Amino acid sequence: MPVLMAAGSYAVDPGPSGGGWRSWAELAEGEAEARGYYAPVEGVRDGPVGRMLCAPGDVTGPAKRCALYGPDLPRSRPHPDLALVPLHPDTGELWPVPPGVRAVPLHAEIWRHLAFHDERPAVRAGHRLRAELARDDPQPPHRGYWPWVDHQLIRDLLARMPAVRRPGVRAAYDLLRRGYDHG
């Protein structure tokens, strides 16, 4: 992923951070909208606004060097500080790295895509592939369930959109809120 901020740059987060939470009922009229909420939520952060954000390279004593390590790749010289390594699809073990190098685990299919620019999607079809298509990598174990959807995240995103005031969007928001609240 590319760096999102140039070295020496900074940004100010307009949203509140830290502090406690206040319930929707505790907020004065217009206060929720001033904090970026346009529909009822369980709680709103009550911390200060204006948190400073800076480029990642500006906060690390020297810069760290990162490289891909794994099967069918040559080892880089000099050794990096961090190595992106695949997790074995069956055992979950990390690919070994040289002493002094910190291993950063990645799902084997994501690692393979980064290492070999494989254009196949990272999520496999729900059936076994023919041997000539599967190549020499093992199939991941079938988990037997559909991908998980974070309904709370979707509700929070909708609550922060002014469009949630429109009847159709608000109906979808209310349906999500009613159907997946656990509290």
Image (spheres, rainbow, N blue to C red):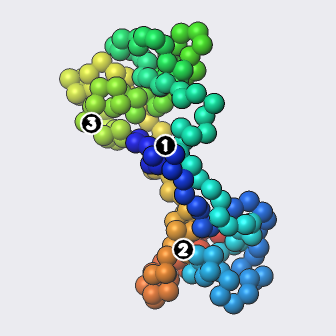
Q: What residue type is labelled 1?
A: Ala
Vertical side of 26 occupied by 18: above or below: above
Residue appearing at x 57%, y 81% in the figure: 38
**Residue identified by numbered label 1:** 7
Quadrant for residue 14, please give it.
bottom right
Residue 128, how many percent across, how many down? 31, 32
Nearest the eye: 26 or 53 = 53
Quick one: SS at disc 2?
A: loop
Query: Which residue occupies 71% across, 79% down?
Result: 24
Q: Which residue is drawn at 67% across and 67% down?
A: 49
Residue 41 visible, this orientation: yes
Among the 4 quarters of the image, the one containing residue 67? top left
Q: Quadrant of the C terminus?
A: bottom right
Q: Quadrant of the N terminus?
A: top left
Q: Do the residues labelled 2 and 1 touch (CB within 8 Å)?
A: no
Measure the alpha-carbon separation of dots 3 and 2.
35 Å
**Callout 2, which amino acid?**
Arg
Amino acid beneath label 3: Arg
Q: Earlier in the sequence, mark 3 or mark 2?
A: 3
Where is mark 2, residue-wise? Answer: 160
From the viewer's perspective, is residue 168 above or below residue 22?
below
In screen coordinates, is 171 left or right of 60? left
Q: Distance of mark 1 from mark 3, alpha carbons?
A: 34 Å
Task: Please say if the residues under marks 3 and 2 sit with CB atoms less than 8 Å apart.
Answer: no
Which of 107 and 4 lies nearest the eye of the viewer? 4
Q: In the structure shown, which secondary structural element does the residue marked by tag 1 occupy?
A: loop
Q: How many marks?
A: 3
